[in-house]
Amino acid sequence: MNWLTGSPQGEAKKLVSQLADLTRRDVAARELIKLGADAVPPLIDALQTQDLNLILLYQQILARISSATPLLTKALATAHPITRGRVVEVFGISKDRSAIPALLDALKGEYFTVRSRAALALAKFEDRQAIPALLPLLKDREDEVRSAACVAIASFRDPATFDDITNILLDDPMIEVRQSAARALGETKHPAAMPFLMEALHDSSWWFEREEAAEDLLKAIEKMGPVVVDPLIKALGDKEGTVRKYAAILLGRMADPRAIEELGMTLYDLHNEVGKAAADALAKFGAPTVDIFIEALSHPEAEIRENSVAALSKIQDARVIPALIEMLRDTARNVQLQALQAISKLRDPRAIPTLQEIVSNRADREMAALAKQIIESMK
């Protein structure tokens, strides 16, 4: 009957229903904001919608109604758990400081989704006084809450809290939570976080049979910037091959010239995955590393020569093609094949005479066929 009598809340309900219509949405949103407190109850009710595309719209409108806080605070204590979690996010958008006490209470609530979202919302206020209330959540029984606590606490970039987050980074039973801790520390980009991330890199539980999970840790370390280059260079000499490999990968991504000499040494690592990672990393430095690779082409270990050939194919430099042509005559077939593949990518006509020699030699039909295909692709 409210719709028929034209009461403010009846009008608000009608306007809320119009938000689903793209042609009427903007007008409806403006009118709801004008209605003020009368628009709040139907908007809070609407937060239970299953249409995820509308939730943020409802929340943004509520955040712009200055008189909404008392009703939102009440809903945070009494509404359905789904609504409570979405009300918390409204406060994260509005940053209404009068809501801080309610959010602090929500950190202790019975619903883990509310606790986790309250942590993230408090972080958006950038009020360091929230840190003591957030720290206990690092020991919460729910994974989602511990993850959110890492993100929220790290957002303050307070080195005094990094040790607490590192307890999660190294010891949490769930790798997904540890990933959250790594990402959170990386986002701080604070030099004081670097030793903790490097400690995790040396922890085999982070990367043993967990290549995909370890990527979050690598990205976090990379975000530390130049300050982490020297520790990574030192890690190239670690006793664990995986640590050396990851250190080489990261140094390649960061492309800091200080790493070139040590990566050149790591190119000869007898752990092939490490040597390959070092070769790939050096290739990213371009022309300054060509001489390093050319020298490695005479190494007695075929895998080192093969890695060097593959890396050379990624560098634009006049010295590359002559070196690759020479490797077509290598004693190891895998190296020859790698050189063929490299030349096929570069498509340099200087290789044609040597390729023709391979075509005319029928001792290895596969090699001859590949060489013929490469020649035809250059025509």
Image: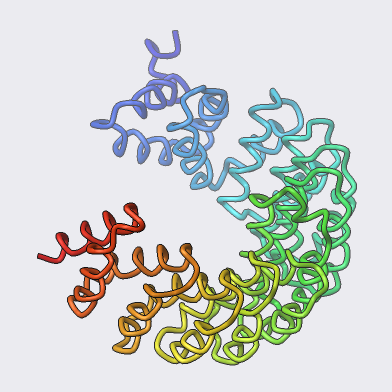
Q: Position of residue 177 (x, y in %)?
A: 76, 47
Q: Nearer the viewer, residue 64 or 56?
A: 56
276 lies above or below 47: below
| Colouring mode (rainbow / by chain / secondary structure / one colour) | rainbow
Residue at image coords 61%, 87%:
259
Q: Position of residue 269 (x, y in %)?
A: 68, 76
Q: Is residue 103 left or right of residue 328?
A: right
Location of the C terminus (image quadrant): bottom left
Q: Quadrant of residue 230?
A: bottom right
Q: Nearer the viewer, residue 286 or 114?
A: 286
Q: Position of residue 9 (x, y in %)?
A: 48, 23
Residue at image coords 72%, 60%:
182
Q: Nearer the viewer, residue 70 or 124?
A: 124
Q: Nearer the viewer, residue 36 or 212?
A: 212
Q: Most extreme residue toward the left, as rendered? A: 379
13 lies above or below 308: above
Residue at image coords 57%, 23%:
48
Q: Quadrant of residue 83?
A: top right
Q: Position of residue 330 (x, y in %)?
A: 44, 74
